[in-house]
Structures are given as C-alpha cells and as structure tokens.
Image: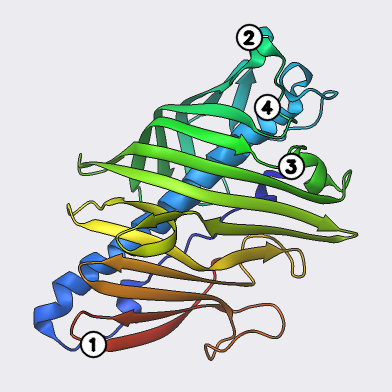
Amino acid sequence: MKRTYFKVLLVLIAVSGLTLTSCRNKDTATNDLYSAQDNNTATQHLNATMDDAANAAGGVAAVSGKTEGPYALVGVTVDSSQKSNGILTLTYDGTTIVDNVFKRSGTVTITLENYANGTRWRDAGAVLDVDYNTVVVTNVVTGAHVQYDGSNKLTNVSGGLAWRIVAGLDQGSVVHRHTANAVQLTFADGTHRNWSVDRTRTYMRNGNALSLTLSGNATEGGHSNVDMWGTNRNGVSFVNEIATPIVFDNSCSNYRNATSGEIKHYVNGNTLDVTLGVDASGNAATGCPYGYKVVYTTSTNHTYSAVFQYWH
C-alpha cells in the first residue's frame, strides 16, 4: 500500500485569489483565510499521522491480531520492541520529503488499550492511544513549520484492518474515529494553541471501487458535524464543520483530490464555505474535478468567491 493513497486534502485558501475591496476589512479577511488554511493544514498532518498509526498497528501481528502485513510508511521507522505490551513507536527521520512538499521529525508512541486482556487492533471497538512528542512538520518550499504535541485516540469502530481494504484483500468497509482533546500546536512564531478533533474516517471497497469518506461528529458553537475546533494563531476561536461528507475515491488518477464534499469554517463571525470537487467554472464536476470553490461571507453580509485548482 503506497503512503500516498490517502492524503486528506490540503485546502489552501490562496489569499491573493480573493479581491477584497474594503480596506477596513482586509486584515480581518486575510486572518480568516489564514485560519482556514491552518485548519486544513492541520487536518492533513493529523490524518497522515493517524494513517501511519493505523498502518503500523495493522502491520504488526502481535498488535493487529492477524498475520504480519505491509505498512509502507514514508520517512518513518517503526520500533516494535515493546509489541508484547501493545506498544509501538514511530520515529520520523526529519529528512524524507513527502509529495515534494513537507518533511517530518519527532516521535509518535502508539499504545493499544486493554492489550493485556486480549484486545487486538482488528477488533471492533479497539482503541489506540496516539501520543505526539515534538512532531514537527515543515513545508520544504516555504520553510513554514508547525509542531504537534499531545494525546489522540483512534478507535476502530467497525473492526477489520484498513490497509487490507486499500490493498484489495478485503471488501466492505472499515470505520475509524479520531478524537483529541486540546492537542497543542506550536506555530513558527512560537505561538501555542490548543485544538480539539472529532472526525470519522470510513474506508470502503466494492469490487475495484475504493473510497475514503470524512465526516465530523461534534457539536460546537451551535454548529453540528464539527470535526475540529479551538483557537487559531491570532487567538480567535474557530469552528470547522464538514457540512457534507468529504469523499476521495479512485475514479481519477489518485486520492489526493476530493471528488465531493463541503466545509464551513466559522471564525470572527464570518463564514468560509469550501465546495470540493468542482470544474474550472465552480460547478460540480462531471468528470475528474478541477478544484474547489471558496465563498467567503462576512458578518456584514458581503460575499466574495473564487475557484482554485487542486494541488498536483
């Protein structure tokens, strides 16, 4: 299984792409757009780490409960010396460049809860404690970086092993739930912020058709289907809602680009609405999507929109 199969979309809101005519609102608009960008950057990094944790746990028989399987992780080594206690440690090498965009350093400790009582990762309801220790993700193009510290939980809601779905060894679905309470993010300027997560990730295979669907589980700030919330780098509270489940599938060349879905990012009383899987005109794509459409509505009901191409 290639590590690039399931990259959650990094929805980079290109600030220069939106023409904001009000000078008074320009700084706020820019900060709001950066807030959405930070949120989606964190989404990519956190989901990539959860993939690594699940693949590592699913690939070590003593932890997975099945025979050894592949866990082709990029730029990371797996220490399984404590597997008899249900513990694995991932170490990112700090040098391997992933997708020509970023590199990672630091360690992640994975502990399977109730291992001593016979629980294995393939079991429905099994829980992995996924602890970040100075995990730094650096954009090799811009030099920007974010550090992640803190505890996460990954629950195997359905049972089964996701890598087997991806590899075509099993049909049907595997459902994971990722939760975290106040993971600490440290931005390049030294700013510390705490973010929380509650999202479901569903892998599904039907014959040759393969998909990954993301949805939010929480209710925060009067919004439902929320997958992430907290305080952004400017100290302003935000809520990120997956209004319509985000779907990645193998109908096109890779899984990097969502074929459908809608995100609403609420910050400063404003709403950024991102529609995924559109054509160059901003309409729902009938073939492989061109990109995503952003509609930015301010608290004073001014609306701006633009269409952006997916990264390749």
Q: Which residue is mark 4?
A: 57
**Residue 100 in the image: x percent, y percent?**
55, 51
- Residue 85's tag is 2
**Residue 305 in the image: x percent, y percent?**
37, 86
- Which secondary structure lies at badge 1? loop
Q: What is the CA distance from the residue labelled 1 to the residue labelled 3? A: 43 Å
Whether label 2 touches label 1, CB < 8 Å: no
Earlier-in-chain disc, 2 versus 3: 2
Q: Which residue is mark 1?
A: 301
Q: What is the CA distance from the residue labelled 2 to the residue labelled 4? A: 12 Å
**Crowd tier of the residue under label 2, counting other residues whose Cα lies within 10 Å: few below 14, some 14–19, many 20 or above:** some
Q: Which residue is mark 3?
A: 162
Earlier-in-chain disc, 2 versus 4: 4
Identify whether 198 is placed above or below 127.
below
Where, by quadrant of the figure, is residue 259 drawn?
bottom right
Picture quarter with the N terminus = top right
Whether label 3 touches label 4, CB < 8 Å: no
Q: Can you tell which of label 1 and label 4 is closer to the viewer? A: 1
Instruction: Say which residue appears at 89% left-offset and 43% top-offset.
Output: 169
Whether label 1 touches label 4, CB < 8 Å: no
- Which secondary structure lies at badge 2? helix
Q: Nearer the viewer, residue 212 or 179?
A: 179
**Residue 308 in the image: x percent, y percent?**
47, 78
- Which secondary structure lies at badge 4? helix
Earlier-in-chain disc, 3 versus 4: 4
Q: Amino acid at mark 3?
A: Ala
Residue 210 can be seen, yes or no: yes
Q: Amino acid at mark 4?
A: Ala
Earlier-in-chain disc, 1 versus 4: 4
